[in-house]
């Protein structure tokens, strides 16, 4: 039977969060699709019209960025994403 685990790269996750964080790209990358879709919908549906949704996902992405940088962010399997192997 094949192992279904996936490998996520710390730097890639950090950069996704930095540049595309409000769209949930870093969460898609770490296979957290539920919250990633939520971030994407909040940004697309309310972010550009009212700006309120963009503030919400911006703060959310900032918190995630800090957690990734401090190596406290976990992927969908519950494993910490760290810069070392």
Image (tube, rainbow, N blue to C red):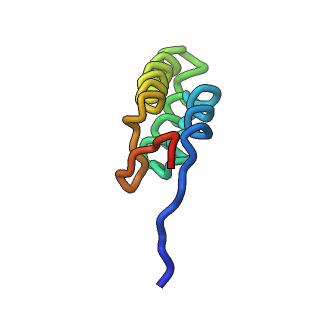
Q: Nearer the viewer, residue 19 or 12?
A: 12
Q: Against 40, is 29 above or below? A: below
Q: Is residue 54 above or below residue 76?
A: above
Instruction: Give the residue drawn at x 52%, y 24%.
Output: 46
Q: Residue furthest bottom?
A: 1
Question: In the figure, residue 49 lies in which quadrant?
Answer: top right
Q: Nearer the viewer, residue 54 or 73?
A: 73
Q: Residue at x 52, y 20 (%)?
A: 54
Number of numbered discs:
0
Percent from the top left, x then y, of residue 32? Answer: 45, 48
Depth order, front residue of 65/44: 65
Residue appearing at x 52%, y 60% in the figure: 6
Measuring from the top left, give residue 57's x and y in whole percent: 48, 25
Vertical order, 45 against 48 (above or below): below
**Picture coordinates of residue 73, whole percent (x, y):** 40, 38
Write the residue at 56% across / 31% down: 17
| Residue at the farthest front position | 84
């Amino acid at each position: 039977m094949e192992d279904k685990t996936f490998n996520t790269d710390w730097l890639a996750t950090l950069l996704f969060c930095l540049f595309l964080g409000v769209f949930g790209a870093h969460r898609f990358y770490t296979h957290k699709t539920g919250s990633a879709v939520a971030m994407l919908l909040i940004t697309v549906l309310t972010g550009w019209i009212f700006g309120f949704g963009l503030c919400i996902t911006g703060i959310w992405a900032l918190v995630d960025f800090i957690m990734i940088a401090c190596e406290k962010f976990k992927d969908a399997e519950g494993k910490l994403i760290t810069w070392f192997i």
